[in-house]
Image (cartoon, grey):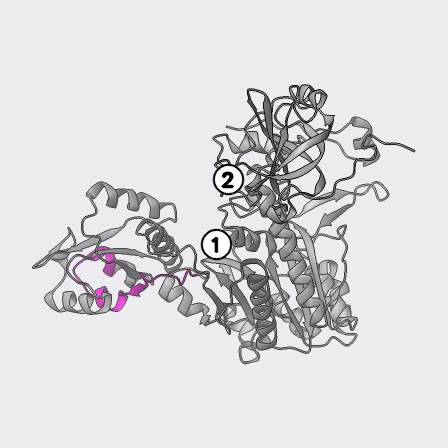
């Protein structure tokens, strides 16, 4: 029985040959990166996922094969047999692992021809992302993307090795499940067998992994796909991958220690870096207080300072009135930035307006005076207090935001990150981890006029705060924890509620009546009554982690077939219309809506 390969079978990848292999006969297969005709001898750079090898068609070796090689063009798919020779002096390429050798071809098979690709198969290309995604099968031939996907594979293998060695079981959970409130919109799947009813694709395996603990599996993990119908950005996708873990009979320290070990193994295996353990820990209130955000980048300074007590009685009414109404005033000292122009300051004012800040006050610290429209409103005592609190020195430019705490912290927190990049304060080769712990259990949604769980409604409160659930929900602290790396939240988890009574109290504090939570979570409440162990877990954003490991700016560059920022696949044109017959089978009817611009 024959096939298109005949007796030709690949012996090596294109990137693995070196001078030690000189004299061997090899068979290589791959794509043509480029072809060069040097007036007789034809050179072809043959590429596969491991690299490039130069192959040579010489008329003095085989005239027929040399003649056939004239037909070769970029991206043709070839198989070649030949002998490995040392490249002539002066023709070696030190930039290639295979740069000392070449393969003199004695047999050639052209498996497939190729149309001219829509862009060059090179790492540095000037082409829009939409075109790259439309031709993703071609884009994925580029060396950088292939390296990203290979690294992703190696990272997943490292995760499995670590968790398997630590007694975890890899257990699959359903994709077709029921809709439960977890913070974002669900993707719904209509049921043909049960007309008018819907499955939901899981935002996470949260409920099922808790049920696995109740079932006695003790340590579970999954590298699992999750689905959220939410607004997208560079580090979000409608379908994404988590490293999901759950453990029984543990506390926060157990889970955090295991997670640190996991990160240490991944970074050692993938980057050869030894992480310093344990990671530092920050209380949520300290993270917000010092950095403005609950995912602080601790690679640089520029910490925020709360000056509310200093300015609450000042003559600057903008500050004083905000404090009087329950707001705060914070400052950020951009050390040595006195030379910022007024236009640059105006641009930064526009930047913080995105985070609802209504203004950005500033003071330039000159040698013998402060320069700013607001300086005249402060007394000498207030100036001395500000200078001491903010560490104001000659050459500094200090920014101020006054508003409600959430607005102030978000605006200055993002401004801090922006200035850290602009002022080159961040070492991109440095990896700084921190834990953020003791999150508030709930926050109040002004739009919905109700309390919402900051993480999810299955997170346990600290025992000392349980009695506050009924009287003061916003003062309840949860047993939640996030792992932050270089200003990105790469993992989050909590100790879970394992008693029905407490879970019902939390549901009630979130504004659910008994009928609602019984309808949505009755199966979980029943399971909690069947002998649920204390348990907790954590989930890591695998795409985001791989993005950081690869040094890429977007998770779309570490996912083989990502969606656009409009949640579309331009390669396959998904989502798409469906037939009337399919809709009728599902008992569905499409309601036409006008697009509003």
| Residue 183 seen from this side | yes
Whether residue 560 is in magenta: the answer is: no
**Most foreground residue, 246 or 328:** 246
The answer to which image quadrant residue 585 occupies is: top right
**Most foreground residue, 23 or 494:** 23
The residue pinned by badge 2 equals 93
Q: Give how far across and how far down residue 12 sits, in percent.
A: 70, 44
Q: Give how far across and how far down residue 89 sits, in percent.
A: 50, 38
The answer to which image quadrant residue 556 occupies is: top right
Relative placement, left or right, of 5 versus 305 is right
- Marks 2/1: CA–CA distance: 64 Å
Residue extending farthest to the left is: 368
Question: What are the residue bounds of the magenta stretch?
Answer: 296-320
Relative placement, left or right, of 314 versus 147 is left
Q: Secondary structure at mark 1?
A: loop
**Most foreground residue, 421 or 205:** 421
| Residue 228 seen from this side | no
Relative placement, left or right, of 593 versus 221 is left
Q: Secondary structure at mark 2?
A: loop
Q: Give how far across and how far down residue 309 sits, in percent.
A: 25, 69
The answer to which image quadrant residue 218 occupies is: bottom right
Relative placement, left or right, of 86 versus 292 is right
Q: Answer few, some or many: residues within 10 Å of disc 2's Cα (few below 14, many 20 plus, some between 14 and 19).
A: few
Q: Looking at the image, do the residues carrying marks 2 and 1 touch, with CB atoms under 8 Å apart?
A: no
The residue pinned by badge 1 equals 446
For image coordinates 65% across by 77% down, the residue present is: 250
Specify which label sits upstream in the sequence, 2 or 1.
Answer: 2
Residue extending farthest to the right is: 1
């Amino acid at each position: 029985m024959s096939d298109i390969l005949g007796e030709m079978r690949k012996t090596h990848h294109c990137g693995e040959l070196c001078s030690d292999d000189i004299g061997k006969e090899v068979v290589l297969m791959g794509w043509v990166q480029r072809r060069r005709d040097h007036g007789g001898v034809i050179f072809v750079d043959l590429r596969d996922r491991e690299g490039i090898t130069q192959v040579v068609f010489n008329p003095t070796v085989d005239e027929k094969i040399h003649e056939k090689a004239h037909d070769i063009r970029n991206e043709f798919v070839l198989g070649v047999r030949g002998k490995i020779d040392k490249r002539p002096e002066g023709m070696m390429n030190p930039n290639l692992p295979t740069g000392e050798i070449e393969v003199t071809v004695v047999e050639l098979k052209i498996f497939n021809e190729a149309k001219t690709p829509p862009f060059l198969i090179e790492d540095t290309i000037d082409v829009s992302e939409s075109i790259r995604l439309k031709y993703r099968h071609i884009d994925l031939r580029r060396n950088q993307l292939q390296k990203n996907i290979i690294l992703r594979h190696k990272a997943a293998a490292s995760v499995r090795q670590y968790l398997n060695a630590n007694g975890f079981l890899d257990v699959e959970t359903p994709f077709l499940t029921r809709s439960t409130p977890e913070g974002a919109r669900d993707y719904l799947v209509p049921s043909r067998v049960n007309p008018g009813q819907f499955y939901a694709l899981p935002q996470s395996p949260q409920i099922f992994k808790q049920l696995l603990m109740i079932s006695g599996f003790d340590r579970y993990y999954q590298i699992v796909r999750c689905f959220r119908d939410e607004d997208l950005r560079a580090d979000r996708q409608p379908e994404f991958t988590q490293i999901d873990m759950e453990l029984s009979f543990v506390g926060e320290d157990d889970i955090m220690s295991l997670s640190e070990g996991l990160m240490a193994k991944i970074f050692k295996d993938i980057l050869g870096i030894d992480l310093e353990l344990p990671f530092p820990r920050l209380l949520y209130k300290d993270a917000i207080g010092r950095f403005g955000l609950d995912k602080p980048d601790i690679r640089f300074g520029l910490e925020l300072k709360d000056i509310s007590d200093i300015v609450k009685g000042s003559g600057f009414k903008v500050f004083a009135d905000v404090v009087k109404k329950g707001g705060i005033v914070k400052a950020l000292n951009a050390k040595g930035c006195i030379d910022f122009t007024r236009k640059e300051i105006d641009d930064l004012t526009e930047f913080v307006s995105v985070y609802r800040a209504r203004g950005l006050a500033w003071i330039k610290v000159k040698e013998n005076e402060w320069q700013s429209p607001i300086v005249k409103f402060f007394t000498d005592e207030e100036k001395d207090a500000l200078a001491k609190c903010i560490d104001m020195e000659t050459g500094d430019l200090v920014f101020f935001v006054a508003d409600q705490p959430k607005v102030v912290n978000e605006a200055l927190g993002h401004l801090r990150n922006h200035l850290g990049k602009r002022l080159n304060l961040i070492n991109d080769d440095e990896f700084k981890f921190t834990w953020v712990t003791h999150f508030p259990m709930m926050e109040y949604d002004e739009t919905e006029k109700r309390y919402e769980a900051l993480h999810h409604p299955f997170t346990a409160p600290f025992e000392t705060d349980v009695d506050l659930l009924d009287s003061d929900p916003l003062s309840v602290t949860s047993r939640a924890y996030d792992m932050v790396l270089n200003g990105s939240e790469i993992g989050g988890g909590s100790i879970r509620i394992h008693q029905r009574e407490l879970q019902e109290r939390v549901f009630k504090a979130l504004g659910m009546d008994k009928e609602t939570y019984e309808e949505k979570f009755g199966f979980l409440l029943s399971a909690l009554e069947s002998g649920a162990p204390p348990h907790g877990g954590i989930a890591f954003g695998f795409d985001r982690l791989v993005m950081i490991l690869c040094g890429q700016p977007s998770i779309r560059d570490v996912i083989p077939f990502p969606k656009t920022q409009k949640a579309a696949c331009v390669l396959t044109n998904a989502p798409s219309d469906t037939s009337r017959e399919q809709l009728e089978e599902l008992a569905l009817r499409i309601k036409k809506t006008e697009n509003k611009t």
